[in-house]
Image (cartoon, helix red, strand yellow):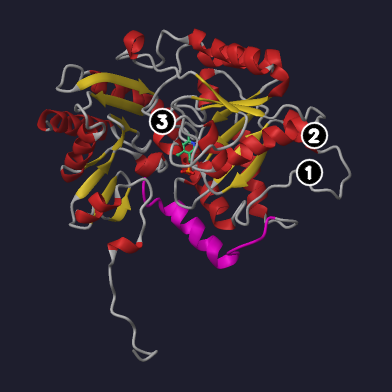
Amino acid sequence: MPASAAPAPTNNLDAFWMPFTPNRQYKAAPRMLVSAKDMHYRAADGHEVLDGAAGLWCVNAGHGREKIVEAVQRQVAELDFAPAFNMGHPKAFEFASRLSALAPRGLDHVFFANSGSESVDTALKIALAYHRARGDAGRTRLIGRERAYHGVGFGGLSVGGMVANRKAFGLGLNGVDHLRHTHDPARNAFSRGLPEHGAELADDLERLVALHDASTIAAVIVEPVSGSTGVLPPPKGYLERLRAICDRHGILLIFDEVITGFGRLGAAFASELFGVTPDIMTTAKAITNGVVPMGAAFASSKIYDAFMTGPEHVIELFHGYTYSGHPMACAAGLATLDIYQEEGLFERAAVMGARLADGLHALKGLPHVIDIRTVGLVGAVELEPIDGAPSRRAYAAFARAFDDGLLLRTTGDTIALSPPLIISEAQVDELVGKLADVLKAID
Ligand code: PLP
């Protein structure tokens, strides 16, 4: 072919190795999204799909927000990239200041990454390096929890507790142990908000302290509400108890707020809602409304200050990413925070969350439904698995709902709902109505 002749356009679906997707099944019947506005996606065949998942838990302000679009366009024209190593640009400092003002009190320092997975790895590394900086280098053990998801880096994978996510990749990090998970359908099925039973499961940390000795443990990481493993709100009192045990033993507490951050639960962060402040907090997703990839780990002044003690010419934390504090992400993030605040979206999430909870709990008794869980603007409907074919039933619900104009997220046999916080009352009702129809229609 002569160099000047452009190759014929191809749309070889096999070239894109899709993440977390059964590639062959998808490519046999692809489901393409081609545009999005406010609460809706448009599919390639032209049908509209109500976004019941905020994309992937990230589009909290809704799709196609002009303020964000314009901010990103202006930014790319003005300053497309600036290194963050020994350099800076004003929006990174401004964004970090705005974020620290929004964060729970004391979490004043923001380390930028590009995803939730990177935020988690950053947080774990900060925890390890913090103890070393204080001369307590024996604290190297990290504690996660069963049924947790902390992304796909080796750090997040190791402290995570999603079995399928771990089993293909070998041993992971050394020196990691896990708390028992808190999910207890026998005592807590169909809970609205935080389940009554299970605060005592936090004492499992005392078991690990007794086993390993506190002097070897750097940090405990938990999601305040586990999302990707089925929407598992913490039992009442659990997080407080975990905080107290960490304090008793000098262990850092990390909250992974990649899903729960930025209003999802009806407050800026879960830690604010639950009144428990971690030492480090990880975020991503809705930090930029999902428009530009970004993650951020927030650290307390106690931690930051512990690093700021050696000679001034020495890098205090030997860690960072080419795209830390990327100008486009910061511009998108600043515009996103403006929208959240101007439109009162976190407060709105609390109001719409109550309506969603009313609607979902009324689905009890529909075919296959074995549990319903709700907290903030998040809901989960768990279906009885088909014998020998786990997740098949929830996948059928997802596929049917998409055809009927509703985007759901499923994990295992749980349907998770987390619409953008701009959702209207009528759209909450529409979402619940469509879901009810789907549940009645599937086998
Ligand atoms: N942590 C939690 C709690 C998450 O839910 C996720 C993603 O869903 C991650 C970390 C990983 O984020 P990312 O996919 O941006 O790497």
Residue 364 percent across, percent down from the top left:
20, 17
Is 67 included in the stretch rendered in magenta? yes
Q: Which mark is residue 73?
A: none
Vertical arrangement, residue 99 with respect to residue 187, above or below: below
Camera-nearest residue between 73 and 316: 316
Vertical arrangement, residue 23 with respect to residue 61, above or below: below
Q: Which residue is mark 3?
A: 227
Ligand 1 is within 8 Å of the C-beta of the residue at disc 2: no
Quarter of the picture containing the N terminus is: bottom left
Vertical arrangement, residue 14 with respect to residue 132, above or below: below
Residue 108 shows up from this direction: no
At 28% from the left edge and 62% from the top edge, which residue is drawn?
Answer: 13
Mark 3 burial class by Cα count in 10 Å: few <14, some 14-19, many 20+: many
Q: Which residue is mark 1?
A: 316
At 13% from the left edge and 32% from the top edge, which residue is drawn?
Answer: 442
Q: Amino acid at mark 3?
A: Gly
Mark 1 burial class by Cα count in 10 Å: few <14, some 14-19, many 20+: some
Q: Which residue is mark 2?
A: 133
Gap between marks 1 and 2 measured at Cα: 9 Å
In contact (CB < 8 Å): disc 1 and disc 2: yes
